[in-house]
Image (spheres, coloured by chain):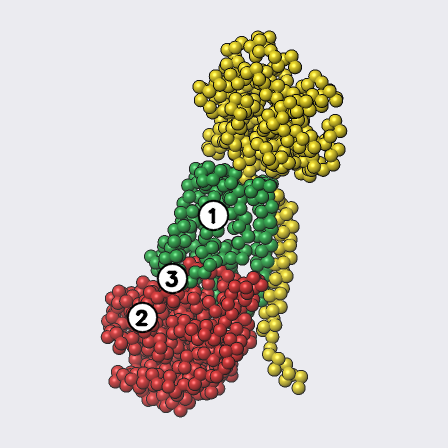
Chain colours: A yellow, B red, C green
């Protein structure tokens, strides 16, 4: 409560972050959002505004990886600045309060900012037994519905809330569904990834705070600016794909030479995300650069799309066993067809019935 | 050679024969009355009995490439796609698809059944427009035996009562007494007598036992006496123990040509029985294309088991004798440039190629091969009994023209041929086209070049 | 399930099953039929030699026919060779087969495969147009002939487009490629494409027949 009244400049000073760094953050965010650099001051103004929008962060069937990503718990970074620009009125992992106090704070924030707060969700919602995921005696489903009713917009952080994610994977024992399957009357932006890239998450929030609208979305509700191109098209190993130089195993000469990982199951060509451009850990690296194929974690059903190590050129269900079984069935059928044909031929070639009658007489 | 027929006699006989052949259509019995169901049923029955694994595989091997049209003289000559050889198998394929294909349960849904109209429309394709020459077989990338399957189509149409009138006349005649063109026993004996007088020796007739049985044909009895006369003279010269038989002199088989399987079997079996009775080692069939496969490659099938004698055609018998040195021929005074026509049933379907060539070389003539020769030659245009079919006239001329073009390109002064039907087609074609190149019988040529001193022995 | 998941998964699996069963059904049905016996004496012994011979001589037309059928023979060769090389010697296809049989084999360079694939596709399209315009082919062609050409061309077209990343998004083109292959597999046993298994036995049969008569074709 006290923090809300402190001006941003003071809070930044307290954290040892210069105004220059802050402005650099705003310019970077503008750039990431594919906006003109001229809009950077507007972002700065919005973030500095004493009026800090309320953000309710609900966590359902999740691993907390999305929160970890945005916080980069191991090393505090400039992205966590975003928390200075918002009023994070509910976050189960980060909040100091616990128990009924925490729930009361949430309900108060929701009441005070009704119609205007941002709802952030990570984790999927179980439609099966509510007991799979219940907080404070209330099922995730009810909590979501109640929270969504007063939200201005919903940001689904991570593949679980966007598409169902890992809980949704076969056999989906909890009946997990994405948020968009439950809430259909509010603007929803999906920011998938397992987890999503930190800068992507903060940029989406910043965009909404600055402009009051969600960025342009693709057919899966993902911001086009980050999810409009596939990994394959931006991957630095693309020339090797074109030349047909592939790593065959994880430790062969091709792997050591940094060749394309298509044959080791990389899903880059069918995965839309910004990993190849923005990378991870402040641009240090991303999975392919580290020598492992892309899992496709920002796509729906990435867990069920065939093995991570099965290349896209392989069928996912066709296999030796099926074909042998089909072969056996086929041979049986072929023999049956042949025998039937022989029998028919013999009937056709048999002497005429008149002749047989004569024999009898 | 002793002249057994003068040019005048030949011309007269030709005119008479031609007139007789032209009137056959009117003399034929009317088309048998059958219901549509009977016709269709009969045709399908023939098809289905004959289809075996090999034929089924072949029918399923066609990829509709159209190459067959590039080999068929009728297709090439008319440029009309309706004569494309594989079209002749359409009805057979439909029946196979519907009734015997392993996929019949599926094909039945979209393959139309046979109708009488289909059968009637098919007549032209398998009679008029096909001599079963087999050239299409040789170009087909899938190696489909179109020609033999056309023969099966003739059998099916015959069973359905739909063979051409001219062939029905001939088939019914042979079914009744085994003769063609009225060449009955009396005429045969008359001809033998005539030949004896001209040749100057007694022709062995009706020996109880002999080494060789010489068969002739109504066509030779009426018309091409130089062919039979030549064979007889050559056999006599070689001192072979041969005979002709009054009960087995007709080599032609209009059962085969018309598609009437019953008559075909009856006629072949008759010759087989006579040959067995006479205990011959070799049966020589006359200069007549189809008589060769009728006995050589069908004798055992008709008989139901192996036959105890060899079957050779005239060119084969004497050609082999020349090649093995058993027959010496004198060189002709002239080194004439000639072309050789390999009759389809003797060459491509019989394997007799080198023997006639050996004879031509032995008599010192220069053979200029036509572009399409040996197994790849063009048909004379009127084989398989088609020379009798009136409605096939235009097509015969088309076939003739293609063959004659190739012959003209060789610069030959004569055409040598060892088949009366081919010879007939060339002569008729010549008249209609105004060509004059002489057509020689190989048998006659052999006799004409026998050494005067009769030194060669069998 | 996305289109790609469906195409790579159940669609391909079921198509492969239909293909196996269909092909074996038809092969068995043909092979086990009764065979007509030949009783007449053969002019040349060992007719199987004639069968083998003709199986191979028919790969190229006899000299007298060459001028007339050269184009279709050459086109056929180019198409078939391209087809076999692209399907079995492209890296990513070898990966596909490896997923089924457990082992792979050496591949041809991508550039060669793309070139051959494009040429094969061009030949197919040319032959399709020829079939539509040539009077003989028009007369003897049925739905099966046209459809078989189109259905065979689709995997080439979708494959080239997917690999070159042109046309629709990669995941869609790849899905279409898988689906076109599934369609081809399902169409195969019931259409003229089955000639893969009938052409050589047919040639063999003819070779034997003529060899028996002493004729080598």
In front of the other: label 1 or label 3? 1
Residue on which the image places disc 1: C154
Local crowd size for mark 1, using a 10 Å CA cut-off: few (<14), some (14–19), many (≥20): some
Instruction: Check the picture and name the quadrant holding the C terminus of chain A.
Output: bottom right
Task: Give me the C-alpha separation between circle 1 and circle 3.
Answer: 25 Å
Residue pictured at 58% horizontal, 67% vertical: C34
The mark nearer the N terminus, 1 or 3, is: 3
Q: Quadrant of residue B225?
A: bottom left
* Chain letter of disc 2 in the image: B
Does dot 1 land on a helix, a strand or a loop?
helix
Q: Residue at position x 39%, y 77% from top?
A: B385
Question: Which residue is denoted by mark 3 in the rendering?
Answer: C136
Label 2 secondary element: helix
Residue B451: image quadrant is bottom left
From what the image shows, is residue B195 above or below residue A192?
below
Question: Which residue is at 37% across, 65% downward?
Answer: B81
Q: Nearer the viewer, residue B339 or B212?
A: B339
Residue C201 in the image: x percent, y percent?
51, 59
Image: B153 above or below C139: below
For this view, does C11 lie left or right of residue B10?
Answer: right
Mark linked to residue B398: 2
Can I make out residue B326 in this image? no
Is mark 1 in CB contact (under 8 Å) with mark 2?
no
User: In the displayed structure, does residue B400 sit left or right of residue A99?
Assistant: left
Which-is-in-front pick, marks 1 and 2?
1
Up the image or down, C3 lies above or below C61; here it is above
Residue A187 at x, y percent in the picture: 57, 32
């Amino acid at each position: 409560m006290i923090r809300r009244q402190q001006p941003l400049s003071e809070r930044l000073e307290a954290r040892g972050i210069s105004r220059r760094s802050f402005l650099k953050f705003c310019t970077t965010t503008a750039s990431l959002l594919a906006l003109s650099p001229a809009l950077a001051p507007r972002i700065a103004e919005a973030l500095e505004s004493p009026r800090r929008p309320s953000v309710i962060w609900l966590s359902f069937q999740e691993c907390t990886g999305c929160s970890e990503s945005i916080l980069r718990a191991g090393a505090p970074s400039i992205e966590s600045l975003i928390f200075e620009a918002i009023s994070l009125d509910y976050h189960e992992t980060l909040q100091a309060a616990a128990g009924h106090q925490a729930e009361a704070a949430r309900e108060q924030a929701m009441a005070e900012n009704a119609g205007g707060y941002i709802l952030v969700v990570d984790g999927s919602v179980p439609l099966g037994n509510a007991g799979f995921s219940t907080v404070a005696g209330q099922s995730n489903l009810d909590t979501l519905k109640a929270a969504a009713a007063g939200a201005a917009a919903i940001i689904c952080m991570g593949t679980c809330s966007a598409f169902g994610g890992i809980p949704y994977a076969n056999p989906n024992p909890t009946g997990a569904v994405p948020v968009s399957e439950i809430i259909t009357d509010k603007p929803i932006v999906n920011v998938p990834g397992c987890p999503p890239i930190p800068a992507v998450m903060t940029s989406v929030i910043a965009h909404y705070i600055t402009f009051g609208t969600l960025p342009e979305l693709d057919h899966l509700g993902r911001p086009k600016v980050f999810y409009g191109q596939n990994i394959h098209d931006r991957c630095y190993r693309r020339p090797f794909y074109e030349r047909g130089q592939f790593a065959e195993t994880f430790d062969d000469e091709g792997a050591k030479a940094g060749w394309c990982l298509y044959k080791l199951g990389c899903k880059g060509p069918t995965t839309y995300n910004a990993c190849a451009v923005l990378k991870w850990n402040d641009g240090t690296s991303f999975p392919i650069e580290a020598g492992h194929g892309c899992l496709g974690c920002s796509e729906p059903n990435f867990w069920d799309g065939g093995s991570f190590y099965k290349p896209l050129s392989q069928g996912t269900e066709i296999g030796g066993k099926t074909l042998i079984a089909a072969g056996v069935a086929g041979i049986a059928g072929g023999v049956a067809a042949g025998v039937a044909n022989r029998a028919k031929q013999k009937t056709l070639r048999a002497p005429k019935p008149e002749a047989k009658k004569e024999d009898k007489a | 050679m002793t002249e057994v027929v003068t040019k005048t006699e030949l011309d007269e006989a030709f005119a008479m024969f031609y007139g007789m052949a032209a009137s056959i259509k009117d003399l034929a019995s009317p088309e048998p009355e059958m219901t549509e169901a009977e016709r269709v049923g009969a045709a399908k029955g023939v098809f289905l009995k004959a289809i075996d694994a090999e034929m089924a595989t072949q029918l399923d091997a066609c990829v509709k490439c159209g190459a067959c049209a590039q080999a068929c003289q009728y297709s090439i000559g008319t440029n009309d796609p309706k004569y494309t050889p594989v079209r002749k198998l359409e009805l057979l394929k439909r029946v196979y698809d519907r009734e015997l294909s392993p996929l019949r349960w599926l094909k039945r849904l979209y393959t139309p059944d046979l109708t009488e109209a289909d059968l009637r429309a098919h007549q032209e394709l398998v009679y008029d427009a096909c001599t079963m020459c087999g050239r299409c077989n040789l170009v087909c990338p899938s190696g489909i035996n179109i020609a033999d399957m056309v023969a099966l189509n003739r059998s099916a149409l015959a069973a359905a009562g739909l063979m051409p009138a001219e062939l029905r006349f001939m088939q019914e005649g042979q079914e009744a007494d085994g003769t063609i063109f009225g060449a009955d026993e009396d005429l045969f004996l008359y001809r033998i007598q005539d030949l004896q007088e001209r040749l100057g020796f007694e022709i062995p007739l009706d020996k109880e036992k002999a080494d060789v049985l010489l068969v002739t044909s109504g066509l030779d009895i009426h018309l091409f006496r130089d062919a039979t006369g030549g064979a007889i003279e050559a056999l006599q010269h070689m001192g072979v123990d041969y005979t002709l038989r009054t009960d087995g002199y007709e080599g032609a088989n209009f059962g085969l040509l018309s598609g009437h399987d019953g008559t075909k079997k009856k006629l072949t079996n008759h010759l087989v029985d006579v040959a067995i009775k006479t205990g011959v080692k070799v049966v020589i069939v006359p200069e007549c294309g189809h008589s060769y496969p009728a006995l050589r490659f069908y004798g055992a099938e008709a008989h139901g088991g192996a036959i105890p004698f060899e079957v050779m055609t005239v060119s084969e018998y004497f050609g082999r004798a020349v090649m093995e040195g058993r027959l010496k021929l004198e060189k002709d005074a002239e080194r004439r440039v000639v072309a050789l026509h390999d009759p389809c049933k003797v060459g491509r379907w019989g394997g007799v190629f080198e023997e006639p060539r050996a004879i031509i070389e032995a008599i010192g003539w220069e053979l200029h091969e036509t572009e399409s020769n040996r197994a790849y030659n063009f048909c004379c245009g009127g084989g398989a009994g088609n020379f009798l079919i009136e409605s096939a006239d235009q097509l015969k001329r088309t076939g003739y023209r293609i063959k004659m073009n190739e012959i003209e390109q060789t610069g030959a002064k004569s055409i040598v041929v060892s088949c009366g039907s081919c010879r007939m087609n060339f002569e008729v074609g010549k008249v209609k086209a105004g060509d004059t190149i002489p057509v020689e019988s190989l048998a006659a040529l052999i006799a004409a070049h026998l050494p005067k001193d009769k030194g060669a022995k069998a | 399930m996305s289109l790609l998941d469906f195409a790579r998964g159940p669609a391909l699996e079921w198509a492969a099953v239909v293909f196996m069963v269909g092909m074996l059904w038809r092969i068995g049905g043909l092979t086990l039929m009764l065979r007509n016996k030949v009783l007449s004496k053969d002019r040349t012994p060992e007719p199987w030699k004639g069968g083998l011979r003709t199986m191979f001589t028919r790969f190229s037309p006899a000299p007298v026919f060459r001028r007339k059928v050269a184009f279709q023979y050459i086109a056929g060769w180019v198409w078939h060779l391209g087809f076999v090389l692209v399907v079995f010697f492209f890296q990513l296809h070898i990966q596909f087969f490896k997923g089924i049989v457990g082992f792979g084999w050496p591949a041809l360079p991508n550039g060669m495969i793309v070139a051959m694939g494009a040429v094969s596709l061009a030949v197919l399209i040319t032959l399709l147009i020829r079939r539509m315009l040539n009077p003989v082919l028009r007369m003897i062609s049925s739905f099966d002939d046209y459809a078989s050409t189109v259905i065979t061309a689709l995997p080439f077209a979708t494959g080239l487009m997917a690999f070159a990343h042109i046309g629709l998004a990669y995941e869609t083109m790849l899905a279409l490629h898988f689906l076109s292959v599934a369609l081809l597999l399902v169409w195969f046993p019931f259409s003229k494409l089955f000639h893969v298994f009938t052409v050589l036995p047919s040639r063999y049969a003819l070779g034997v027949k003529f060899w028996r008569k002493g004729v080598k074709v």
